[in-house]
Amino acid sequence: MKNQAETRTADKPGLLDFHLMKFQEDGWPQELLDKAGRIFTVCLYDASECTHCCEITPSHWLVPLYHTTEKPIPEEVQDQIDEADLEPFYVHCQDCRSDFHIGNPLKDEDRNKSWKELSMSYDDVMEGLREYEACNWRF
């Protein structure tokens, strides 16, 4: 079985192309929505990676970092929201639209480098970004 780094697209072999996306989720209890407004999950994904999940349309693997809300909320309401699962999931590539794109987590000097240039494995780069962004909420 190939690892993630070996499944890169030929035109971007090993280049870092990580993004943050704010993804609105449905299914929250109405009482939370009344207090918080829309509830978003901020996710990290690698735009150079895509997977075909038993279909023709490719998907990105999104790694949830945290939940954020449209309105300011008290800490106890945020605690209720934070109890929700943060399990990674697939989203069709075309659904990762620019209107949901909220940033690139890489430092300017690290953009357009390959993960090999950072002397780290792909998994270490991904985990480092996930940990940093999950602990340092920007949105």
Image: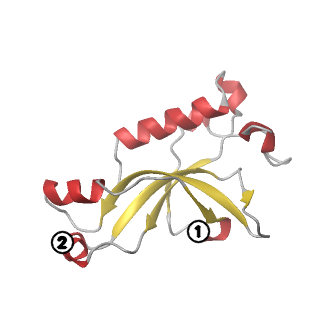
Residue placed farthest to the top in the image? Answer: 119
Does 70 sit left or right of 95 as displayed? Answer: left
Q: Amino acid at mark 2?
A: Lys
Ranked by sequence position, the earlier of labels 2 and 1 is 2
Residue at position x 35%, y 40% in the image: 136
Asked where in the image residue 7 lies, by quadrant, the reply is: top right
Which label sits in the foreground, 2 or 1? 2
Residue at position x 41%, y 60% in the image: 41
| Vertical order, 31 against 58 (above or below) | below
Does 63 sit left or right of 24 as displayed? Answer: right
Position of the C terminus, as image quadrant, is bottom left
Q: Secondary structure at mark 1?
A: loop
Pointer 2 residue: 35
Give the mark count: 2
Residue at position x 58%, y 29% in the image: 124
Image marks 2 and 1: residues in contact by CB distance under 8 Å = no
Residue at position x 48%, y 40% in the image: 130
User: Residue 97 shows which numbered tag?
Assistant: 1
| Vertical order, 31 against 48 (above or below) | below
Does 72 sit left or right of 14 as displayed? Answer: left
Residue 61 at x, y = what percent?
61, 54
Residue 92 at x, y = what percent?
65, 67
Q: Secondary structure at mark 2?
A: helix
| Vertical order, 49 against 13 (above or below) | below
Does 44 sit left or right of 111 as displayed? Answer: left
Q: CA distance from mark 2 to mark 1?
A: 27 Å
Asked where in the image residue 76 lies, by quadrant, the reply is: bottom left
Q: Amino acid at mark 1?
A: Arg
Q: Residues within 10 Å of mark 2 (few under 14, many from 20)?
A: some
Nearer to us in this view, 3 or 109: 3
Q: Residues within 10 Å of mark 1 (few under 14, many from 20)?
A: few
